[in-house]
Image (spheres, rainbow, N blue to C red):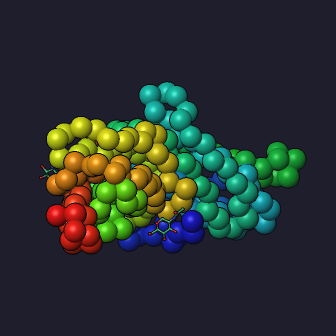
């Protein structure tokens, strides 16, 4: 999904400027702006500006954790562009963001290479659980939406597990490895049996080691069919 260009509002951390020897006539430099905290499971946008540029430069970006490249992105940038980098789920801690700029040597281009340290942190991500109704009757379908967002309300497309527990504590249904189709939203549904346990049911969702819950009620037909009381 489109996202705002990286800016000071969410922390420019990588400001790499260099004078290139390749074209001594003009001052050359580049500016890379990336968020200071990367979220696991999120596609981060890295903004690349190349000054005094007359030809396209191929820019490659890698995210490296403990010497291993866990994600890569690339694009061609004329003067300003955005390169997206998908941060794998389940990562946490320090990583290196490595950036290369290349042009065919024959085209008198300059080459830059630099890196910085970024933090991958899921802190602040939240899962909101919603049901289509607060109260259900036997045989009704329970519709559940999970909304996953960071603390600054960016959607998280991380994997999530969910399950539903009845008032006796029995796990009635579970979903593992759910993945949002987009925008940090997952929808599920399940039918209640014709003889569900009445009372408070709980939906649990687990993401990045945190568990979230939300309750709903299952009641008798009572109000609908007074003759069954
Ligand atoms: C990398 O960027 C830093 C500034 O953030 C700069 O001081 C350093 O010279 C750069 N390294 C290279 C190889 O360009
Ligand atoms: C998921 O639920 C939301 C909110 O109820 C709804 O707008 C959306 O269409 C649903 N998507 C799917 C794929 O069911
Ligand atoms: C449900 O979540 C709340 C916090 O939102 C927590 O206080 C409560 O203990 C949780 N319930 C269960 C059964 O885990």
Question: Residue placed at 40% from the left, 45% from the top?
Answer: 160
On screen, residue 9 above or below 73: below
Question: Residue placed at 32% from the left, 41% from the top?
Answer: 172
On screen, residue 107 above or below 90: below
For residue 146, side relative to residue 168 (left or right):
right
Please indicate, yes or no, whether residue 116 appears anywhere in the rendered image.
no
For the N terminus, the quadrant is bottom right
Which corner quadrant of the image does residue 170 belong to? top left
Residue 99: image location, x then y, percent: 58, 46
Question: Residue placed at 37% from the left, 60% from the top?
Answer: 140
For residue 83, side relative to residue 165 (left or right):
right
For residue 52, side relative to residue 190 (left or right):
right
For the C terminus, the quadrant is bottom left
Residue 28: image location, x then y, percent: 65, 61
Residue 105: image location, x then y, percent: 82, 45
Residue furthest to the top:
67
Residue closest to the eye, 140 or 114: 140
On screen, residue 163 above or below 156: above
């Amino acid at each position: 999904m489109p996202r705002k260009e990286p800016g000071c509002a969410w922390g420019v951390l990588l400001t790499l400027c260099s004078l290139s020897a390749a074209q001594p006539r003009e001052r050359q430099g580049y500016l890379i702006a990336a968020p200071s905290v990367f979220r696991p499971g999120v596609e981060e946008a890295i903004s690349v500006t190349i000054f005094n540029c007359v030809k396209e430069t191929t820019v490659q970006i890698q995210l490296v954790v403990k010497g291993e490249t866990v994600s890569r992105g690339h694009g061609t940038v004329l003067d300003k562009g955005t390169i997206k980098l998908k941060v794998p789920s389940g990562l946490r801690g320090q990583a290196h963001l490595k950036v290369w700029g290349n042009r065919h040597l024959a085209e008198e281009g300059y080459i830059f290479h630099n890196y910085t340290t970024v933090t991958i942190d899921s802190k602040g991500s939240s899962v909101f659980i919603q049901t289509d109704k607060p109260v259900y009757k036997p045989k009704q379908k329970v519709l559940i939406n999970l909304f996953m967002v960071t603390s600054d309300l960016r959607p998280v497309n991380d994997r999530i597990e969910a399950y539903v527990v009845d008032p006796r504590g029995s796990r009635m249904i579970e979903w593992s490895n759910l993945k949002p189709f987009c925008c940090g939203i997952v929808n599920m549904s399940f039918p209640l049996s014709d003889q569900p346990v009445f009372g408070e049911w709980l939906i649990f969702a687990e993401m990045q080691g945190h568990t979230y819950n939300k309750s709903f009620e299952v009641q008798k037909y009572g109000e609908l069919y007074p003759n069954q009381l």
